[in-house]
Structure formats: structure tokens, C-alpha cells
Image: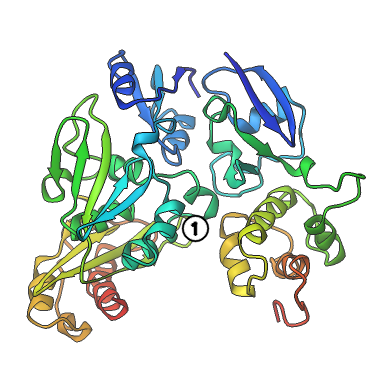
């Protein structure tokens, strides 16, 4: 069947099977490989994208079920001129990544938090990122990056 | 994952008709079902998405009753219940993680009746009514053991109606990896009557702890359940906890729920 949706502001469509996951559709049909598949069991959060403004795990949602939706992926997080977006830049500035595999999901989850809670506490950041697993950093620098992206002091974060 | 035909009806009547096909299964938020399908634990030939049916969504409050549409997500319930029924808001806001809460629904959770799911404890403790496309089912009759409910083939949950308790709280001892309850207790007080429902602990799924109910109905205080022993018979045994550990948690989490209510 044909599925049409808006991805990063652009209308996109492609053929899918019933079982085609949104993550598969984004990566294999639309070649948007910034969305990573870490566990495929809905636990790691690397595949996090926004559907109609809400963060979801794209490995646990069928592409056909979001037909017509507005989807934002990590490729949609950069500024119009191609420079890094606010959250992305904060991750770079504060070394919020090592291998980078979880980073697309971390950025998407963090952006979803800041959209509804522009000045989160450190505890709120940690609570919000519960569904995103990083196996490199131990999370401290990720939390710092989110605090920085929200314009808050990071000196005490994760101390 | 085996392939299937995907249909997304816009009304309950169309969904019921679609579910009449051989091998058809309803899909709500899919946060359990899709994972099960990946492992071939479920392999429907037709998947009927309920997420496009507006009549199944939303929360309303009238006459001391909160009615939650079956396809309302955990995140939406957490937001809508916050001021009116904080015990339910806490429960909904503690399920899984933010992404799961944006997809998973109350109807899906209740219909699946996972023995460690959070929602069944609130439904049972509140003596809520499960409204389907065919009838109304009292919570005491609805849950019939692990992954088993009173739902018949082709029957869809439309809404869950909660009489809003005077005091209530949910206390979950979390399995840290999955955030399911290792043992979770929902306590609901209606006048002198207190109901206590336990999830995550028993091989039979959610159950009412009658001894705790009696003690709390006589004295609604966390101290009332101190010293009460729960039998480990029939409790879940896994690498996270022994039956005796879970049995002990029943009274511990009940006391915490009362203190938080």
C-alpha cells in the first residue's frame, strides 16, 4: 500500500507492507539513515522521532499507522542554513556523545522535553531520558548538554 | 515479523466488522503487541488499528466519574487526570518512558492484562467499569488471570469509567529495566470502604488484597497494614524477585500508597 506523510516539512510517500515499521520506512524507503535502530525491542530509544510533535520510538510503530502525520527526524533538527540546531550544538559543545549511536534519539527526546518544559531541572531531564540508553557516556554530559540547550547553568549539572 | 493486512477504520462499527475477518486482531498503541509480533508471539493476518477512531479518545469528568476513552494515551491521561484524580495521573505518568506514554493506551493495557501492567490495578481498586461495544463489565468480573479477560472475540473496549476516589495513590516497586511493576499497589478510598489492588506480584495477574482492605477500612493509615503477612503461594518467581520477596512487597507498597494518598 502507499503511505504519504510529511517528513521534516516535506511531503513524502512510498510503498509499504502492513508490517513495515516507521524506522524501516524512514531508513530504507526515504534513505533518512540518521534515525538509528539500536535494539529493535523498544528499549534503547535510538530510533526516537517526533510524530505530530510527540516523541515516539519509530521501531514500535507501523508506517501505515502514521499516514498523513507530520514526522520530524534528526535530519530535520539542523538550522535552515545547515548549521547545527540548538540541541545538536549543545551536545557537541558539552561532549554529550562518544560513539554517537544513541545521539539521534537523545537529541529528539531532549528536544521534545524542551518543547513542553523549556527550563527543566536536572532531575526532570534525567527522568525524561529514561527511555534512551547510552552505553558510552554515563549520561552526565548528555544532561549537561540538555541543560545548556535550555539556556541554564550547567556547572552543577551531574555533579 | 509475518506480514498482515493493515486496516485503519474511522468508527467502532467499522472496526468490529474488520475484526470479523479470520485471524484479525485489534491494534491500539502497539507498545506491547508490536514487540510480541516481532518475536512471532502474535501473528495476526489482519491488523485493525483503533488509533483513528475519534470516539475512543479523550477524558471527561462528570458527577464524580472520570471516563477515559480506550484509545487515550498514557501521556494524555497523566495530563487530564492531574488535577482531578492525581492517583491515576501518577500511575499513567509512570508507565514505561515518555515515548511509550505517547503511544500506549489504557484500552490496550487493560485488554492485554499483563500481570505486571500498571493500569489493571487502578481499574480493579476503583471498581471501575469497562465499557465495550457490547456491554459494561465490572472490574471484579473483567480480569480473569494472566493475559486473560472477560472480553469475547471481536469485542472492543470503548472506555473505562472510574468512580473518582476520595483518596487514592499508586505505589510501584519498579523493575528498573522494563519499568513494569515488580509489585505495584493501587489503594482507593471511598468513604469508609477501601479497596487495594496488586499488580506484578501474582501468577494470576492483578488481585485484590482483602486482608489489607479490611485493615485499611477499619483504620486508614499506613501503620494499619504493618505486620500483615501475605502468602507467597502463587506469587511470581523470576530473576528479579522470589515469591516471598514479592509477597513482602505487597504490604510494603500498600503502606507507601496509603502514605502517598
Q: Residue A122: x, y in percent?
A: 64, 74
**Residue B184 falls left or right of residue A67:** left
User: Toward the viewer: B187 or B129?
Assistant: B129
Q: Residue at x 70, y 68 (%)?
A: A143
User: Toward the viewer: A114 or B2?
Assistant: A114
Disc 1 packing (10 Å; few <14; some 14–19; many ≥20):
few
Q: Residue at x 72, y 26 (%)?
A: A11
Q: Residue at x 43, y 33 (%)?
A: B51
User: Toward the viewer: A51 or A129?
Assistant: A51
Say how many tags the image has.
1
Q: Residue B208: x, y in percent?
A: 15, 60
Q: In the current view of this chain or complex, which residue is farthest to the bottom?
A: B223
Position of residue B254 relative to residue B36, above or below, is: below
**Quadrant that contains the C terminus of chain A:** bottom right
Chain of the residue under label 1: B
**Residue B92 falls left or right of residue A92:** left
Residue at disc 1, secondary structure:
loop
Q: Quadrant of residue B184?
A: bottom left
User: Toward the viewer: A116 or A90?
Assistant: A116
Position of residue B27 relative to residue B235, above or below, is: above
**Residue A79 falls left or right of residue A113:** right
Residue bearing the label numbered 1: B177
Q: Residue at x 73, y 70 (%)?
A: A147
Whether residue B144 is visible to the viewer of this picture, yes or no, is no
Q: Quadrant of residue B234?
A: bottom left
Q: Residue A96: x, y in percent?
A: 78, 62
Position of residue B149 relative to residue B41, above or below, is: below
**Residue B216 falls left or right of residue B66:** left
Amino acid at each position: 500500500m502507499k503511505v504519504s506523510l510529511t517528513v521534516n516539512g516535506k511531503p513524502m510517500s512510498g510503498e509499504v507492507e502492513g508490517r513495515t515499521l516507521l524506522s524501516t520506512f524512514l531508513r530504507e524507503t526515504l534513505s533518512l539513515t540518521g534515525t538509528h535502530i539500536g535494539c529493535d525491542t523498544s528499549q534503547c530509544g535510538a530510533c526516537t522521532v517526533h510524530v505530530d510533535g510527540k516523541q515516539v520510538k519509530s521501531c514500535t510503530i507501523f508506517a501505515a499507522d502514521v499516514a498523513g502525520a507530520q514526522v520530524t527526524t534528526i535530519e530535520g533538527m539542523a538550522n535552515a542554513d545547515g548549521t547545527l540546531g540548538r540541541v545538536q550544538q549543545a551536545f557537541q559543545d558539552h561532549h554529550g556523545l562518544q560513539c554517537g549511536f544513541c545521539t539521534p534519539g537523545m537529541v529528539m527526546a531532549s528536544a521534545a522535553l524542551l518543547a513542553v518544559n523549556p527550563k527543566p531541572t536536572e532531575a526532570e531531564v534525567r527522568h525524561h531520558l529514561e527511555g534512551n540508553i547510552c552505553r558510552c557516556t554515563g549520561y552526565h554530559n548528555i544532561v549537561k548538554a540538555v541543560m545548556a540547550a535550555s539556556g541554564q547553568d550547567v556547572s552543577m549539572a551531574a555533579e | 515479523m509475518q506480514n498482515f493486512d493493515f486496516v485503519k477504520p474511522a468508527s467502532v462499527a467499522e472496526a468490529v466488522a474488520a475484526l470479523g475477518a479470520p485471524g484479525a486482531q485489534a491494534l491500539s498503541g502497539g507498545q506491547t503487541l508490536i514487540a510480541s509480533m516481532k518475536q512471532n508471539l502474535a501473528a495476526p493476518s489482519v491488523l485493525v488499528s483503533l488509533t483513528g477512531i475519534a470516539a475512543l479518545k479523550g477524558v471527561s469528568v462528570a458527577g464524580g466519574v472520570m471516563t477515559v476513552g480506550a484509545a487515550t494515551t498514557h501521556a494524555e491521561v497523566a495530563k487530564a487526570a492531574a488535577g482531578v484524580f492525581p492517583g491515576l495521573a501518577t500511575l499513567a505518568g509512570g508507565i514505561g518512558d515518555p515515548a511509550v506514554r505517547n503511544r500506549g493506551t489504557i484500552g490496550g493495557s487493560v485488554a492485554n492484562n499483563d500481570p505486571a501492567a500498571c493500569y489493571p490495578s487502578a481499574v480493579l481498586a476503583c471498581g471501575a467499569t469497562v465499557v465495550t461495544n457490547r456491554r459494561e463489565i465490572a472490574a471484579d468480573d473483567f480480569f480473569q488471570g494472566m493475559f486473560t479477560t472477560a472480553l469475547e472475540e471481536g469485542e472492543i473496549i470503548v472506555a473505562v469509567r472510574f468512580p473518582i476516589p476520595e483518596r487514592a495513590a499508586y505505589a510501584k516497586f519498579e523493575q528498573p529495566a522494563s519499568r513494569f511493576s515488580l509489585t505495584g499497589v493501587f489503594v482507593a478510598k471511598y468513604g469508609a470502604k477501601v479497596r487495594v489492588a496488586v499488580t506484578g506480584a501474582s501468577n494470576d495477574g492483578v488481585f485484590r488484597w482483602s486482608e489489607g482492605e479490611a485493615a485499611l477500612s477499619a483504620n486508614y493509615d499506613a501503620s494499619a497494614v504493618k505486620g500483615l503477612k501475605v502468602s507467597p503461594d502463587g506469587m511470581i518467581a523470576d530473576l528479579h524477585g522470589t515469591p516471598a520477596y514479592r509477597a513482602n512487597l505487597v504490604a510494603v507498597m500498600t503502606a507507601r500508597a496509603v502514605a502517598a494518598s
